[in-house]
Amino acid sequence: MSQVTAMAKQLNPMSTECLRIVQVTDPHIFAEPEGKLLGLSTRVSFEAILARIQKEEIAPDLLLATGDLSQDASEPAYQYLLDKFHQLNYPCFWVPGNHDDADLMEHTLVGQNVLPHKRILTPHWQIVLLNSVVKGKVYGNLAATELEFLSNALKEFPERHLMVVLHHQPVNVGSSWLDKLGLRNADELFEILAQHEQKTSVIWGHVHQDFEDTQNDIQLIATPSTCVQFARESEDFAAGQESPGYRYLNLYNDGRIESWVHRVDELEYTVDYTIKGY
């Protein structure tokens, strides 16, 4: 078995028609239970999201957590997340964000159904999870080792549809301040993806807002945060008024993707819009 295959998790979807995924992102959990982001209790909103997910009519096959899982990169925050993910009855996978400590996550955010694998294989899909974090920076960049990992994965299973998962956005989303903090070497990523002949998609977090587009037949998807949202089309930092959310995705055997953003509108919370950073 090759090294890249050894790092993969084989999954058989519950449905023969599609792979069902739930994506949560940017919960910004603090070490302290009462920790708040822009006035919003991130644990309260995260638990409301998980409660909503567990009420889904059709259970997902897996969960993807796409970075900024902790606001303060603390062990208590990751232990809290581990305990919450253990309450789910399906595998959970993660990538780090710029607020995270990837090394600490590898030691604490793993066990039972919380898995460290960075490739997920099904009969029709290959999901590759990449680390886009630059230590000490808000913007992202894919190291040469990450790009090589992706390239080797595609060479090994060129016949499968592909989903790439990372934290930083590889395209502009329309907010000037956010667009400066995306993936710096997105061109290298897309150069590799252009060589893949099957259906391809990229999903991420970081931007705290819903975003969908297509570029060169590659489906591009960003998902709202489980806590505070960022205002769309803003020149400078600004919090949005949308409720906390997550995304549900169906990955069909023919490469099609259907997805929906679900929000927890019934949650009572107060965001401090006077705060101009986080």
Image (tube, rainbow, N blue to C red):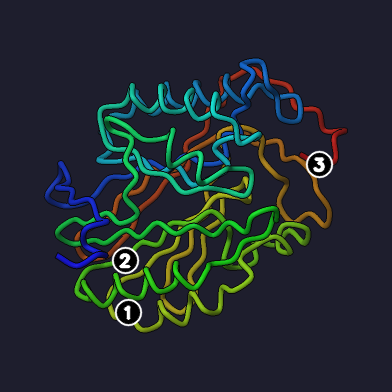
Q: Position of residue 57 (x, y in %)?
A: 28, 29
Quarter that holds the C terminus? top right
Q: Position of residue 112 (x, y in %)?
A: 27, 30
Query: Image height check: is 129 above or below 152?
Result: above
Q: Which mark is residue 183?
A: none
Q: Amino acid at mark 3?
A: Gly
Query: Image height check: is 67 above or below 233?
Result: above
Q: Which mark is residue 277?
A: 3
- In the visual, does 150 lie left or right of 273? left
Q: Residue at x 71, y 36 (%)?
A: 241
Query: Local crowd at mark 1 within 10 Å, few (<14), some, or many (≥20)?
Result: some
Q: Secondary structure at mark 2?
A: strand
Q: Which residue is mark 1?
A: 196
Q: Secondary structure at mark 3?
A: loop
Q: Which is nearer the eye, 216 or 150?
A: 150
Image marks 1 and 2: residues in contact by CB distance under 8 Å: yes
- In the visual, does 139 lie left or right of 165? right
Q: Amino acid at mark 2?
A: Leu
Q: Which is nearer the eye, 257 or 153?
A: 153
Q: Which residue is mark 2?
A: 162
State the CA–CA distance, disc 3 to disc 2. 35 Å
